[in-house]
């Protein structure tokens, strides 16, 4: 999949939190915002980026949302919203919902999502999405040219 697929204007049918898997793009969810952290700056391969984290949920569970760039203040604790055009990644074994510049967020009536959100989270492993691993380190010393272990 290329990054253009999450920039398309078309919306997809809303997904439940427990259906989210790493690698999904152009995702729509209807959620209640449970908590939000203040914006902070992090270093990435692309340079400094401003992010904010939130915990959002629906009747099937909860997930961490990461808001990037201009979207860092787009969610407020306690509100009920529809998020369109998000993408799903895995970070430290957990599923993350990503919100960027092409993601749309709209308010929903408070009764659209229940106030009681289960503490369950979608599983990142075995989801068929992209996972990133680093090759293991050698467990034996490297020989220099002409050197032996004896």
Image (spheres, rainbow, N blue to C red):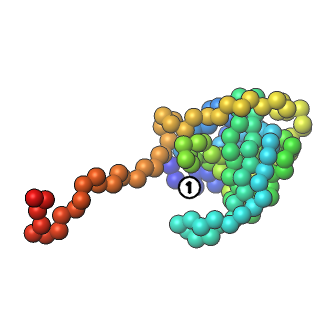
Q: Nearer the viewer, residue 147 or 31?
A: 147
Left or right position of 20 against 119: left
**Residue at x 78% of width, y 59% of height:** 38
**Residue at x 53% of width, y 66% of height:** 45
**Residue at x 71% of width, y 28% of height:** 60
**Residue at x 48% of width, y 45% of height:** 130
Q: Whole-percent x and y of residue 25?
A: 59, 46
Q: Secondary structure at mark 1?
A: helix
Circle 1 is placed at which residue position? 3
Q: Is residue 48 visible?
A: yes
Q: Is residue 131 above or below residue 41?
A: above
Q: Is residue 66 above or below residue 30?
A: below
Q: Whole-percent x and y of residue 18?
A: 65, 31
The C terminus is located in which quarter?
Answer: bottom left
Q: Whole-percent x and y of residue 73?
A: 80, 58
Q: Hey, which residue is sitting farthest front in the picture?
A: 150
């Amino acid at each position: 999949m290329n990054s253009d697929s999450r920039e398309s204007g078309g919306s997809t049918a809303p997904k439940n939190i427990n259906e989210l898997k790493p690698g999904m793009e152009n995702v729509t969810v209807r959620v209640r915002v449970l908590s939000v952290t203040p914006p902070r700056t992090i270093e990435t391969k692309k340079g400094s980026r401003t992010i904010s984290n939130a915990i959002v949920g629906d009747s099937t569970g909860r997930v961490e949302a990461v808001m990037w760039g201009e979207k860092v203040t787009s969610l407020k604790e306690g509100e009920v919203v529809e998020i369109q055009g998000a993408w799903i990644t895995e970070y430290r074994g957990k599923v993350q919902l990503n919100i960027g510049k092409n993601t749309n967020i709209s308010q929903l009536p408070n009764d659209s999502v229940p106030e009681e959100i289960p503490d369950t989270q979608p599983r990142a492993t075995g989801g068929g999405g992209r996972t990133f691993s680093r090759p293991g380190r050698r467990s034996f010393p490297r020989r220099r040219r002409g050197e032996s272990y004896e």
